[in-house]
Image: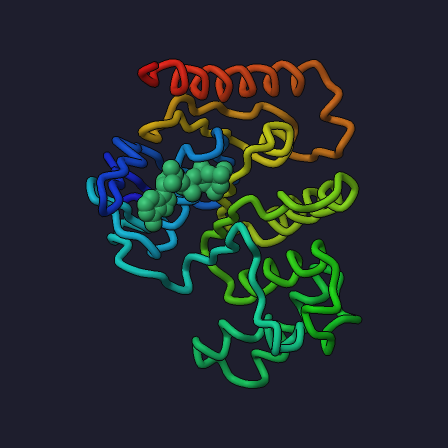
Amino acid sequence: MSAGLELAGVGKTFPGGARVLEGIDLSVAPGEFVCVAGASGSGKSTLLNLVAGLLEPTGGTVTWDGRPVTGPGPDRGLVCQTGELFPWRTVAANVAFGLELLRISRAERARRVRWYLEEVGLTAYADALPGSLSGGQRQRVAIARALACEPHVLLLDEPFGALDVQTKEDMQIFLRQVWRDTGTTVVMVTHDVEEAVFLAGRVVVLASDPGRVAADLPVDLPAERDLAVRRTPEFLALRTEVEDLVRLHHTAHTARRPG
Ligand SMILES: Nc1ncnc2c1ncn2[C@@H]1O[C@H](COP(=O)(O)OP(=O)(O)OP(=O)(O)O)[C@@H](O)[C@H]1O
Ligand SMILES: [Mg+2]
């Protein structure tokens, strides 16, 4: 049995007939950082929800460490596109939420909440309510909440989509650091190609209607990356290649519409 994540011939057709994904084959090895890029509506969130176990495939199989995914589990932590927090819980209590569900002891809960709030730089906000935080801070709490359960794979759905450029860059640096510190497998959805190439070791491009894997490209950049890497010829070449692929598979989709 293969370790990590394995999608074999995965399809998803919603009740009512919307055929959103078809024939998705994708393997992610433990410790990999994979970004999934693709046009809006190509099925990126649907794909992530299938891996999280929030949706069931209508074709093919999703397995994690050789076992079929049948529902959500603590081995897979999802940070969804809207990054919802519980508004009535303090930041610390938000981070503790999954740990309570897992019946982790009070002492261990306190230790992990401290550790992960420190990791996301929000120790000073432990007792604050989400309503008093900025968007970037809230997103960091959502990531800390997912990390606190120490999942084997972290599933991120456009976690930085709503942030300004500066905050987004801080978060990208932070996320790569967390990934390198913890060795967690990361599957992240983004439509920002520069972000995908900067963060990932591999970029998967989805084509639309139905969503399928159009390309799967290794990112041959140094493991030790800072933002300056984005100006190197290697980076720019790969970024252009991925942007062209996203555009190609988007245009092909609109051009096929009867008119
Ligand atoms: N529960 C559902 N029932 C029916 N259709 C759905 C459902 N969820 C998603 N879809 C459809 O599936 C397609 C893909 O949606 P999805 O949210 O996966 O796209 P996406 O790639 O994440 O887009 P975006 O970049 O805008 O977030 C869309 O056409 C959407 O309308
Ligand atoms: Mg989406």
Q: Nearer the viewer, residue 91 or 185?
A: 91
Give how far across and how far down residue 224 sits, in percent: 69, 35
Q: Looking at the image, which is closer to me, 141 or 252?
A: 252
Residue 5 seen anywhere in this rendered image of the structure: no
Quadrant, the C terminus: top left
Q: Quadrant of residue 21?
A: top left
- Classify the position of ligand 1 by quadrant: top left, top right, bottom left or bottom right: top left
Residue 56 vertical position relative to residue 251 in the rendered view, above or below: below
Is residue 104 rendered to the left or right of residue 115? left
Residues 129 and 205: in front is: 129
Type of colouring:
rainbow
For the point 73% across and 26% down, the residue is: 229
Residue plotted at (49% across, 79% down): 100
Q: Quadrant of residue 113?
A: bottom right
| Outermost residue toward the front in this view | 259
Q: Residue at x 27, y 41 (%)?
A: 12
Instruction: Locate residue 1, reporting x and y percent.
Output: 25, 46
Q: Residue at left 61%, top 20%?
A: 239
Return the residue nearer the eye: 27 or 247.
247
Above or below, 142 against 252 in this view is below
Give coordinates of residue 167: x percent, y percent.
76, 46
* Residue 46 position within the rendered picture, expressed as x and y whole percent measured from the top left: 38, 44
When the figure is inspected, residue 256 is found, relative to residue 45, above or below; the finding is: above
Q: Residue furthest bottom?
A: 106
Dividing the picture into quarters, in which one does residue 251 lie? Answer: top left
**Residue with the most extreme left position:** 59
Q: Is residue 208 visible?
A: yes
Total residue callouts: 0
| Left or right: residue 216 compared with residue 195 | left
